[in-house]
Image: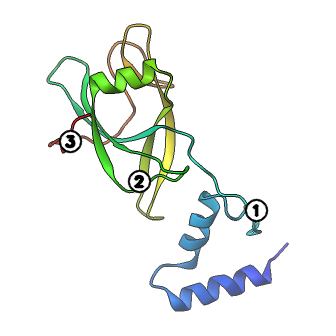
Amino acid sequence: MRNSWLDEVKKCLDEESAQKSDVHLDRLREQGIIDERGEVTGQLRRWDAFLAITEVKHAGGRGQIEAFRCLKPVFGMPGVALIDISRDSMVNYLKQGKKVITAIRDERLGMWKEDCNVHLSANGFVLCDSAGDGEDNVGRLPEFQQTTSRR
């Protein structure tokens, strides 16, 4: 089934923007505003996390992450301010039952996307859902060099 109105919207967006219309529509889909058929859902996909880790700084050779660069979601949206959280603070948040996720930047869409849930292992390591227990491991997040603020 073809949606001629959807093709017309894509054409208008292409004419008005430097970005291709599929980027705009993919972004709306990712946010939950429209479904796969391009129909309005009336819903916005919200993050229910306390923090979203975007980058890490590893401690020298100890298998631990020294600091976590995080987004602080606000009203279910990713937020824009990045804050640095110490490992001790992150462990405390996880012990308190705060939901922490990782987030990856989708450069094509120009937005942050949820990646995986983070938890504390029985051995005290900070892990993504699928990571093994033996060292801190929150996936393939980029490394940052300089910390900005400590919590």
Indicate the quadrant containing the N terminus: top left, top right, bottom left or bottom right: bottom right
Residue with the mark numbered 1: 41
Kindly identify the amino acid type of the residue bearing the numbered disc 3: Ser
Separation of disc 2 and disc 1 at Cα?
Answer: 24 Å
Please name whichever residue, 89 or 132, is drawn nearer the observer in this view of the structure: 89
Secondary structure of the residue carrying tag 3 is loop
Is 129 situated above or below 40?
above
Is 137 situated above or below 39?
above
Separation of disc 3 and disc 2 at Cα?
Answer: 21 Å
Please name whichever residue, 81 or 28, is drawn nearer the observer in this view of the structure: 81
Separation of disc 1 and disc 3 at Cα?
Answer: 39 Å
Q: Position of residue 74 (x, y in %)?
A: 48, 50
Kindly identify the amino acid type of the residue bearing the numbered disc 1: Thr
Q: Position of residue 13 (x, y in %)?
A: 58, 85
Q: Residue at left 44%, top 44%?
A: 103
Q: Which mark is residue 105?
A: 2
Horizontally, is 18 left or right of 89 in the view? right
Kindly identify the amino acid type of the residue bearing the numbered disc 2: Arg
Secondary structure of the residue carrying tag 1 is loop
Residue farthest toward the top in the current orientation of the protein: 123
Mark with earlier residue (1, 3): 1
Q: Residue at left 37%, top 12%?
A: 124
Q: Position of residue 128 (x, y in %)?
A: 45, 27
Label 2–label 1 contact, CB within 8 A: no
Disc 2: CA contacts within 10 A as few (<14), some (14-19) or many (>=20): some
Secondary structure of the residue carrying tag 2 is strand
Residue with the mark numbered 3: 149
Mark with earlier residue (3, 2): 2
Q: Residue at left 77%, top 83%?
A: 5
Horizontally, is 133 left or right of 117 in the view? left
1 or 3: mark nearer the eye: 3
Indicate the quadrant containing the C terminus: top left, top right, bottom left or bottom right: top left
